[in-house]
């Protein structure tokens, strides 16, 4: 006879079922609490299994917040930020009447990744918004990969958006022009070794990504900074800055390529979590161990540089991912001429058909081959705070569950994240180089998204097109992305995408990283002299371009050109931005009637 002590707890999220229900049909809820009870189960022919069970209540709330609503801290931030935004909009739009309550639109800034190019250009874009008094109109700021390097640095100052950004910009210029070899010096490596040993003693797993995190930290900061993600709560405590949200992907540690399985994971100063499952933990608890929603082993919160390494973790490729990326770079828009409805990359091909999945068991040979192709030798693994939570039997029919349209794993609960021991987190660019997803949660009610895209040349519109396709597949309100061949051959500085028939879809102001009228104008309306024309030449195209994603060092002149280009492109479209803000207010007023 086997004895077991079972704890029962009913979770608050309908995506997750009550774990205290046996699959053979015995409800643990029906058993008396605190008393041993014998349960007999059929085991084999002429044999049975006897269990001696005692059910105890698990007192207290679970430590994983289950639900899709915004946490109380973010709701409090929104209440405070709305007053700042309303005042800023009234001034910049010269409104005759004060904005009331729900008339205040939620405006967000979205930045893609792109290494040092994204970091540098993002400073220029934010600087332009500040100079036009538009930064106080923004409620959310999201970033992925390289743009998170800018955000991390800015939020070390609790009042950064109210101070002149030229100070942080000059620091960034100094860091990016600095020789990076010192990050790989013997002295630096010894320092990394000491810190990583200390990190291991604190119970954290140590990986190559942690080394990469320390290298980034060394390259773009003077001294070791002890700031943590939760410390950024002070920078939004009075609604004085936009709320920062950082984006990563959760993928399979082994056996699957990124194109077959990926989930958006968001990081804010308040929480880390998955909107797909409606499961979140406090940011200071990320890296600690959880089971069945309970915090089992608390670890010290990591320095934010270790998260920075995760958000720009480009080292977890397996061979299948590498091959898919190679195919994409050879032909970023396969089948375009044959069928415009065809997906533009392997990541959005339709593998999911209907509700039936056919799974073929692997043989020894195929299992070995699959392991070689999908193993991630340099992955970054963190304790899975969803571990032990059991999905409700009808989870995939729940309105908040994000069913991926390009794979069938969402129909197989045993393949989903709650069954994994660890999370495998990587750069969002493995799927779509974007940080849109947190802004598309209906609970955030975002009206306008200013999209800063740091892709260049052939991939310039790839992210926004992929996002449009992804939202169409998922049924997420998002404007249709329509671009002509002329747009792609001669791109404009800014595009407005709006679904006028669906007010739930945000208006997207999309800024591509292009050098258009900046060639001839140093400021909006002010032409360059013949001697100044050289300052308008920004090289994104040649083989010697300094702005390649792999390049982490620019000269001061190269940094200034990219910064000034980004600044100019936003300022040159000031009227378009203001018109869009007015349009968002009008939509709000109409929806109230």
Image: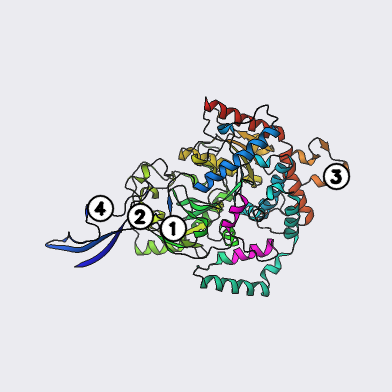
Q: Residues within 10 Å of mark 3 (few under 14, many from 20)?
A: some
Q: Are marks 3 and 1 in contact (CB under 8 Å)?
A: no
Residue 198: x percent and y percent?
56, 73
From the viewer's perspective, tell me whether residue 545 is left or right of residue 526: left
- Comes first in the chain, label 4 or label 3: 4
- Comes first in the chain, label 3 or label 1: 1
Q: Secondary structure at mark 4?
A: helix
- Comes first in the chain, label 4 or label 1: 4
> CA–CA distance between discs 3 and 2?
62 Å
Residue 266: x percent and y percent?
52, 51
- Comes first in the chain, label 2 or label 1: 1
Mark linked to residue 385: 1
The residue carrying mark 3 is 532
Q: Is residue 482 visible in the rendered structure shown here?
A: yes
Mark linked to residue 414: 2
Determine the residue located farthest toward the left in the rendered image.
46
- Comes first in the chain, label 2 or label 4: 4
Query: Which quadrant would residue 126 be assigned to in this image?
Result: top right
Q: Main secondary structure of the magenta part?
A: helix
Foreground: 17 or 539?
A: 17
Residue 225: x percent and y percent?
64, 63
> CA–CA distance between discs 2 and 1?
16 Å
Q: Secondary structure at mark 2?
A: helix
Is 197 above or below relative to 344?
A: below
> CA–CA distance between discs 4 and 1?
25 Å
Q: Look at discs 3 and 2 and give the one toward the viewer.
A: 2
Q: Is residue 437 visible in the rendered structure shown here?
A: no
**In the image, which residues are magenta?**
211-236
Q: Are marks 4 and 3 in contact (CB under 8 Å)?
A: no
Q: Secondary structure at mark 1?
A: loop
């Amino acid at each position: 006879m086997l004895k077991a002590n079972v704890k029962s707890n009913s979770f608050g999220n309908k995506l997750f079922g009550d774990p205290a229900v046996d699959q053979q049909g015995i409800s643990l809820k029906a058993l008396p609490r605190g008393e041993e009870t014998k349960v007999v189960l059929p085991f084999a022919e002429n044999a049975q299994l006897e269990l001696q069970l005692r059910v105890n209540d698990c007192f207290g709330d679970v430590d994983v917040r289950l639900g899709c609503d915004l946490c109380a801290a973010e709701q409090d931030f929104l209440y405070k930020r709305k007053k700042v935004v309303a005042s800023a909009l009234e001034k910049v739009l010269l409104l005759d009447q004060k904005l009331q309550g729900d008339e205040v639109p939620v405006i967000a800034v979205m930045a893609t990744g792109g290494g040092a190019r994204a970091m540098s250009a993002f400073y220029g874009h934010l600087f332009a918004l500040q100079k036009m008094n538009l930064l106080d109109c923004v409620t959310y700021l999201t970033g992925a990969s390289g743009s998170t390097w800018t955000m991390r640095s800015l939020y070390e100052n609790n009042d950064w958006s109210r101070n002149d950004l030229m100070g942080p910009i000059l620091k960034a210029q100094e860091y990016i022009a600095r020789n990076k070899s010192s990050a790989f010096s013997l002295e630096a490596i010894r320092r990394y070794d000491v810190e990583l040993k200390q990190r291991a003693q604190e119970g954290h797993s140590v990986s190559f990504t942690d080394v990469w995190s320390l290298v980034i930290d060394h390259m773009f900061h003077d001294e070791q900074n002890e700031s943590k993600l939760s410390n950024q709560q002070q920078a939004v405590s009075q609604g004085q800055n936009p709320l920062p949200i950082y984006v990563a992907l959760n993928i399979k540690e082994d056996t699957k390529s990124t194109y077959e399985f990926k989930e958006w994971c968001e990081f804010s100063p308040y929480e880390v979590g998955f909107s797909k499952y409606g499961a979140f933990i406090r940011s200071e608890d990320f890296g600690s161990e959880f089971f069945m929603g309970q915090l089992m082993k608390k670890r010290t919160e990591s320095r934010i540089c270790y998260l920075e390494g995760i958000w720009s973790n480009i080292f977890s490729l397996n061979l299948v991912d590498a091959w898919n990326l190679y195919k994409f770079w050879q032909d970023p828009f396969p089948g375009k001429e044959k069928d415009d409805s065809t997906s533009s990359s392997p990541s959005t091909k339709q593998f999911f058909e209907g509700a039936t999945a056919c799974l073929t068991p692997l043989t020894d040979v195929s299992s070995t081959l699959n392991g070689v192709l999908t193993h991630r030798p340099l992955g970054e693994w963190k304790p899975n705070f969803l571990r032990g939570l059991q999905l409700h039997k009808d989870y995939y029919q729940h309105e908040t569950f994000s069913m991926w349209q390009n794979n069938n794993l969402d129909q197989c609960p045993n393949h989903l994240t709650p069954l994994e021991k660890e999370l495998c987190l990587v750069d969002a660019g493995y799927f779509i180089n974007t940080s849109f997803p947190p802004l598309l949660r209906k609970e955030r009610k975002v009206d306008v998204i200013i999209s800063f895209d740091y892709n260049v040349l052939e991939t310039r519109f790839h992210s926004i097109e992929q996002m449009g396709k992804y939202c169409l597949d998922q049924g997420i309100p998002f404007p249709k992305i329509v671009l002509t061949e002329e747009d792609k051959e001669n791109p404009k500085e800014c595009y407005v995408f709006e679904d006028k028939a669906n007010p739930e879809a945000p208006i997207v102001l999309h800024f591509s990283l292009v050098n258009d009228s900046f060639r001839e104008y140093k400021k909006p309306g002010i032409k360059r002299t013949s001697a100044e024309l050289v300052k308008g030449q920004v090289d994104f195209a040649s083989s010697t371009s300094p702005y390649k994603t792999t390049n982490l060092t620019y000269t001061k002149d190269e940094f200034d050109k990219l910064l000034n280009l980004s600044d100019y492109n936003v300022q040159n479209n000031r009227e378009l931005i203001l018109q869009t803000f007015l349009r968002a207010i009008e939509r709000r007023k109409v929806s109230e009637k």
